[in-house]
Image (cartoon, helix red, strand yellow):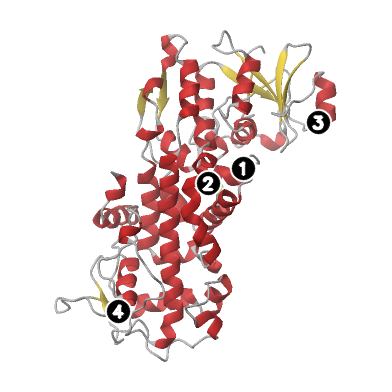
Amino acid sequence: MYKMISQSLSVALLALLSGSSVFAAPAESKSDSRLLSRDTVTLKPSNCSDPGEPVTPSCWTSLKVADYLNNWKKTTRVCGESDTNGVGCCVKEEPWSTCFIRLSTGFAGDSCTGLWGDTYCRIVPTELNKDLAPAALAPARYLLNAIYAIHSLFSSYDDALTAIGDSTIKDVLDVFSKTSSESHVVSLRYELPTALTLGLTVASQTNTNNNTITRDISTLWNSALSAAPSVSRVIWPNDTDNSQTVTITDISISNNNQAILLQGGLSLLMNDIPAFLAFTRDGRFANSTLNNIIPRLVSRADDLADGLNTFVTSKFLQAQGYFATPSIVPMDRTAFETQNRCTLNAGSWCVGDGGKNVYYWSPATHRQYRLRTKGPTPIRLPELMGKITDSGWADAELLFDGNFNCTAKGNAGGRIVFVGEGGVVDASCVSQLPMYLECGTKCPTDVLVEGKCPFGFDGRC
């Protein structure tokens, strides 16, 4: 259904978000029907101008592609009533990317504004309009390549998220569905599709994923979002609050609306030139090798499930009364094992203190966490830790370190994704596992929020 989002909806979405017209009419221009006149762009060396050469970031810079696009915007007029065929002009409210494709390739009807696959985004960068000025050919080819690559990234990402199986979620829900009816209901807002769309963000922040395809694409995704925070804020808006209550048997990723979130980001890029140029800064999409592997992301769908699985698992752990008590001061592995009288297994956890307590030790932060519960639970703590680390119920570092960081910033219990200063996407709050300090533990001054300790205490104080 989401693949059929129309171009008009994409335009309307951007207009709603920005409060302005999508393609504002520029000042009158005397430019001809070509994208740029022959004297406005200097020909570059053949390695950048040769359509047979692979695209490279250095050529993006030397060709001054960003300047070329900004100049194209200024010199390409909006079609008037007498322009019946749209030659040399952009139709009113036509996305800039759609107009650029049409004028530079001659493929009327092609558009990359929607998540509907390559049927309507069939750009062949080497097949350019014969009316283009020779000096415009190389930068136009680079821009077309970037438009196609960005569309491919969003479309492939959506396909990969759609392909994620929910067997892990079903396993989690099966365990918790055996408890009392009060625990069958969980309050959710927008978190399920949000957690799902954090797949690439989480993949770049955890150490469990070493696949080259996932690592390279997640690096591209996160660097682009950091450079263009406006895109992140459209995908994950701060004021989203579609409150709903669902039973655990109704939770399935097939019911999620992740395509709507991704569509918002794609629409912004294909309608707003400043956002597009920030997203593509330094030619990060001018990489033929990377562009070739983007469509293969769907084959790595399971790599993108950590965010969703961690969220769902932590949400139900919270509902069942589970929590963790963290150590404030990190300790090395030897000190940890000595203090707690246990030996860490492959999942970096152990049962210590003579079989009384279950601990997780983070290889990333060297912080220890004691997993605890407020009362009777449907699954014993050692079995639960095994499910988390061995059965893939959650990414353990994200589950524990994530919520520690989330709580230390004063964000626990709020939104699960934040776009910080500099555009960095913070997904630590995707873990909803409560963190309480041991009774008597002093809150460190460097984590005080408005003079108060953001961590609660374990209830025995």
Residue 66 vs residue 167, the one in the foreground: 167
Q: Nearer the viewer, mark 1 or mark 2?
A: 1
For residue 68, side relative to residue 365 (left or right): left
Q: Is residue 426 visible?
A: no
Give the secondary structure at mark 2. Answer: helix
In the image, which disc is placed on residue 209? 1
Q: CA distance from mark 4 to mark 2?
A: 41 Å
Q: Position of residue 158 (x, y in %)?
A: 41, 47
Q: Position of residue 134 (x, y in %)?
A: 41, 87
- Could you tell which of marks 3 and 2 lies nearer the N-terminus? 2
Q: Residue at x 28, y 50 (%)?
A: 5
Q: Residue at x 64, y 39 (%)?
A: 208
Q: CA distance from mark 3 to mark 1?
A: 22 Å
In this figure, which residue is indicated by the disc labeled 3? 333
For residue 143, side relative to residue 406 (left or right): left
In this figure, which residue is indicated by the disc labeled 2? 200
Q: Are marks 4 and 2 in contact (CB under 8 Å)?
A: no
Give the secondary structure at mark 4. Answer: loop
Type of amino acid under label 2: Leu
Q: Nearer the viewer, mark 4 or mark 2?
A: 2
